[in-house]
Image (spheres, helix red, strand yellow):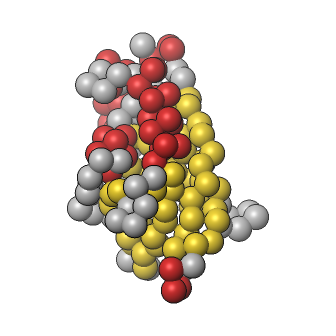
């Protein structure tokens, strides 16, 4: 299936939760690539030339739409104050950021990825031989 590479992208309007619960709008590009079928990449563009990318499990995004998900650097959960929103928390050694995003937009993006690779079939898209060659050539 590796020859059938597909990339799904969606632009989603997130709100960055700044001081005193003030939301700063921020467009985020979500990307799903069958070359890494287990992951989703979120590209945050806080400035004109700046881009910060976070990669995380597609399952984490799906789980976060319906309940608390994640224990590490990325945590996703439904909003306590608005059933139509999802909270995305990013934690790093330099600090943390909290965002809100429309649950419907995230669900639509996930549905598009599921049309390409159904959950549970991700392993069919991984070329183990190519990955092993890549890993062994790095040493």
Q: Residue furthest right?
A: 48
Query: Residue 15: x percent and y percent?
Result: 57, 65
Query: Residue 46: x percent and y percent?
Result: 65, 67
Front residue of 129 and 139: 129
Name the side, left or right, on which 69 lies relative to 47: left
Name the side, left or right, on which 39 lies relative to 32: left
Q: Residue at the location (49% across, 65% down)?
A: 99
Name the side, left or right, on which 135 lies relative to 48: left
Q: Residue at the location (63% across, 45% down)?
A: 11
Q: Quadrant of the N terminus?
A: top left
In the image, residue 11 sits, relative to residue 5, either above or below, namely below
The answer to whether residue 74 of the structure is visible from this angle is: no
Q: Residue furthest bottom?
A: 20
In the image, residue 6 sits, relative to residue 135, either above or below, namely above
In the image, residue 43 sits, relative to residue 128, either above or below, namely below
Name the side, left or right, on which 18 lies relative to 34: right
> How many marks can you see?
0
Query: Residue 93: x percent and y percent?
Result: 38, 77
Query: Residue 20: x percent and y percent?
Result: 51, 86
Q: Residue at the location (50% across, 14% down)?
A: 3
Q: Residue at the location (46% across, 72% down)?
A: 97
The answer to whether residue 80 of the structure is visible from this angle is: yes
Q: Quadrant of the C terminus?
A: top left
Front residue of 133 and 60: 60
Front residue of 42 and 4: 42
Which image quarter: residue 14?
bottom right
């Amino acid at each position: 299936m590796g020859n059938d590479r597909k990339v799904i992208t969606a632009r989603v309007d997130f709100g960055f939760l700044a001081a005193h619960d003030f939301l700063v709008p921020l467009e985020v590009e979500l990307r799903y690539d069958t070359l890494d079928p287990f992951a989703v990449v979120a590209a945050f563009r806080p400035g004109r030339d700046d881009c910060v990318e976070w990669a995380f499990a597609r399952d984490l995004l799906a789980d976060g739409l319906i309940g608390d998900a994640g224990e590490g650097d990325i945590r996703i959960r439904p909003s306590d104050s608005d059933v139509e929103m999802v909270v995305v928390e990013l934690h790093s050694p330099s600090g943390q950021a909290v965002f809100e995003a429309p649950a419907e937009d995230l669900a639509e993006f996930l549905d598009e990825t599921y049309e390409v690779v159904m959950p549970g079939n991700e392993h069919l898209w991984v070329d183990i031989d190519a990955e092993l060659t890549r890993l062994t050539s790095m040493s």
